[in-house]
Amino acid sequence: MQHDITLTRGPVRLRPLVLGDAAALRALVDEGIWAGMSCPLPRTDAEMTAHLAELTGSPALYGFTVERDGTVVGRTAFYDLVPGLRVEIGHTFYARDQWGSTLNPTVKLLLLDHAFAAFSVARVALRCDSRNTRSRGAIQRLGATYEGTLRRFRRAADGTIADAAYFSIIAEEYPAVREGLLGRIDQ
């Protein structure tokens, strides 16, 4: 979906995902980074452009390009929004040099703040391929609660049918989660 939401905190900016981001995003990904996604790795700029066209054309997805200090360092999205009730955060990947930095907590703080304030949701869900231990750990460090695993839930990038580990943060939990994120960002 085309949207006009831009979220910023310090050097981190989430801006609407556009087709012109294809080359920068494709340059960040490899088999390992893409392993948790639900479609094959776009190996060329044209394939990434087609992938982004599919995402930005989806009426249920708000895609964002993630920038740090003006440089494209990743992608994320809101999807399956039911205003006043729930939304999911996903389609996320970051450049390897951003792993373990304050980027993910900052991005999630921006998204969660927007979800609970602007969308007025009661629940934000996050999920990952259950085999992706790095993503599972990152989601748990955010303060999300593990809800269970949906077996044989979706296609994986490698063509298999993968289980999805589901996590959530509900509105009543968010103040404590937010404080935890701020503590990680402001270290």
Image: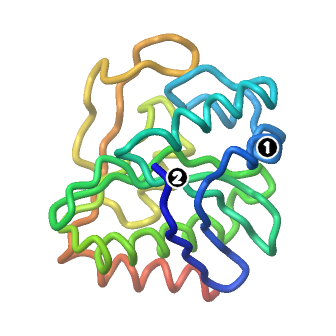
Looking at the picture, which amino acid does disc 1 mark? Leu
Secondary element under disc 2, as helix, strand or loop, is: strand
Give 44 or 38, whichever is nearer the viewer.
44
Res 145 visible: no
Give the distance between the C-alpha atoms of the residues marked 2 and 1, in whole angstroms: 17 Å
Percent across and percent down for residue 178 are: 39, 81
Mark nearer the viewer, 2 or 1: 2
Q: Specify the amino acid type for callout 2.
A: Gly
Task: Write the residue at 67% across / 75% down.
Answer: 12
Q: Horizontal and vertical percent for residue 82?
A: 20, 56
User: Image point 64% across, 86% down: which residue?
Assistant: 187
Residue 67, position as x, y percentages in the image: 72, 66
Q: Is residue 98 visible?
A: yes
Q: Is residue 54 above or below residue 63?
A: above
User: Which image quarter: residue 8?
Assistant: bottom right
Left or right, 146 with reference to 84: right
Residue 28: give its label: 1
| Camera-nearest residue between 1 and 142 | 1
Q: Residues within 10 Å of mark 1 (few under 14, many from 20)?
A: some
66 left or right of 181?
right
Label at residue 63: 2
Q: CB of mark 2 within 8 Å of CB of mark 1?
A: no
**How many numbered marks appear?**
2
Say which quarter of the image contains residue 162.
top left
Q: Which mark is residue 181?
A: none
Left or right, 84 with respect to 2, comes to left
x 68%, y 51%: residue: 94
Q: Earlier in the sequence, mark 2 or mark 1?
A: 1
Q: Secondary structure beneath disc 1?
A: loop
Q: As displayed, is residue 119 above or below residue 184?
A: above
* Camera-side residue of 117 and 168: 117
